[in-house]
Image (tube, grey):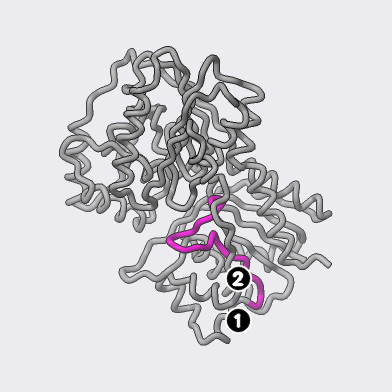
Amino acid sequence: MISHRDIPLHCFHQALEAVNGEWVVQRQLAIQEPQGPVHGVAIGKAAAAMARGARAGLGGRLERALVITRHGHGDDALARDGRFSCLESDHPLPGEASLAAGERLLAFIAATPSDASLLFLVSGGTSCLVEVLPEGMTLANLQRLNGWLLGSGLDIQAMNRVRSAVSRIKAGRLRGYLGQRSAQVWLISDVPGNDPAVIGSGLLTPTRESLPLPTLPAGLSETVHRAMAAHATLSRSTPSVPARVLATLEDACRAAGDAARQRHCPVTIHGEFLKGEAAERGAALAHWLTHEGRATPGVHVWGGETTVTLPENSGQGGRNQHLALAAARVLSGCPDVTLLAAGTDGSDGVTSATGALVDGGTWERIRAQGLDPDQALSTANAHPCLQASGDLLETGPTGTNVMDLVIAHIS
């Protein structure tokens, strides 16, 4: 017999398969193959999966490739292939490995023959994994800036505008290192709107409009403006790089809905993009599910990316665990509603979990273990509570990154 908790899990896993980096790259190569010998660069949390797709689809035409991904997201089989150079870099804070990856990236491009094709495969996480700093910008300043950004509550577009301002390769500036080499970039989108200029801070795609930077603390603002003054201006004759987005949050939501229909469940895919404070959204979703939502039982799917404004002494967790715990408080005692909140990349904050699957018993299971879930919400410490209740969701690296899914089931 299928449990009411099994249905959101099934939908989530089917959604991950639909936007897996290996599959979407192979699918695109069957439609559009680069001409001649190909030199590949894969960067991001889904880099290893996208590189596997390129290897399978191009075969011997893939001359060599550079793969830069997050620690723990690599692929030993790729590393054993002599054509591949594989690096694991720092995330969510850039570090020495990020700067080393930036040097390797520029060296790889410089060593690519001028008549060869470069295929860039970019996914979320790229902004932190690879960096080349302008003169006067230090790693310590970069880390302070990114640390502030992660706890600021800013959305990903605003954060990436700031990151681009202090980089020699973001905001399309990597194009200046290509010379006359032909190139194209295929992307998995982890940003609302799926703009190639925002994904990975737009290594090869400059922003179409000059938006102001968000307000920064005084010391950080001075650092950012000094870095901006050190940028070389790209020539107007620098060629554009064709960009194609291969997988999106919308694709994942549709796949989750298809999976529910396969289980003969009615489906509602909610078009609104989930954003804002995770705890507020979790509580609001749970309230809707237990009131207005009862008129439409079945599976409900949302996608987006919420934020958590961290308190001074924050605990352990991530935005999806935080959202799920806030939802669990509202769902407490409700026997017929389950809610899954999870990141599609396999991670949520600095934890081993990607999110959680909560129900009407979660809140009391936490309290029965001697923990205070109310306090956990106020201190952003959801992880120990959801671990104690047995509601954490762990997938490991998924080979994709299209933001977050919330999948609920009303029996």
Q: Nearer the viewer, residue 380 or 275?
A: 380
The relative height of residue 85 versus residue 241 in the rendered view (above or below) is: below
Q: Which residue appears at 60% of the width and 81% of the height?
A: 365
Mark 1 vs 2, N-terminal side: 1
The relative height of residue 354 versus residue 400 in the rendered view (above or below) is: below
- Taking the image as shown, residue 333 lies to the left or right of residue 47, namely right
Question: Does the image show residue 192?
Answer: no
- Taking the image as shown, residue 360 lies to the left or right of residue 377, namely right
> Quadrant location of residue 227?
top left
Q: Nearer the viewer, residue 334 or 399?
A: 399
* Residue 75 image offset from top left, x and y in percent: 52, 45
* Residue 110 image offset from top left, x and y in percent: 33, 23
Q: Which residue appears at 50% of the width and 63% of the height?
A: 352
* Residue 385 image offset from top left, x and y in percent: 51, 76
Q: Which residue appears at 32% of the width and 71% of the height?
A: 313
Query: Which of the numbered marks, if any, corresponds to residue 365?
Result: 1
Prevailing secondary structure class for the magenta stretch in the rendered image: loop
Is 327 included in the stretch rendered in magenta? Answer: no
Is 344 included in the stretch rendered in magenta? Answer: yes
The relative height of residue 132 versus residue 115 in the rendered view (above or below) is: below
> Quadrant location of residue 206?
top left
The residue at which mark 2 appears reads as 391
* Residue 391 image offset from top left, x and y in percent: 60, 70
The part of the chain drawn in magenta is 343-361
Q: Amino acid at mark 2?
A: Asp
Q: Residues within 10 Å of mark 2 (few under 14, many from 20)?
A: many
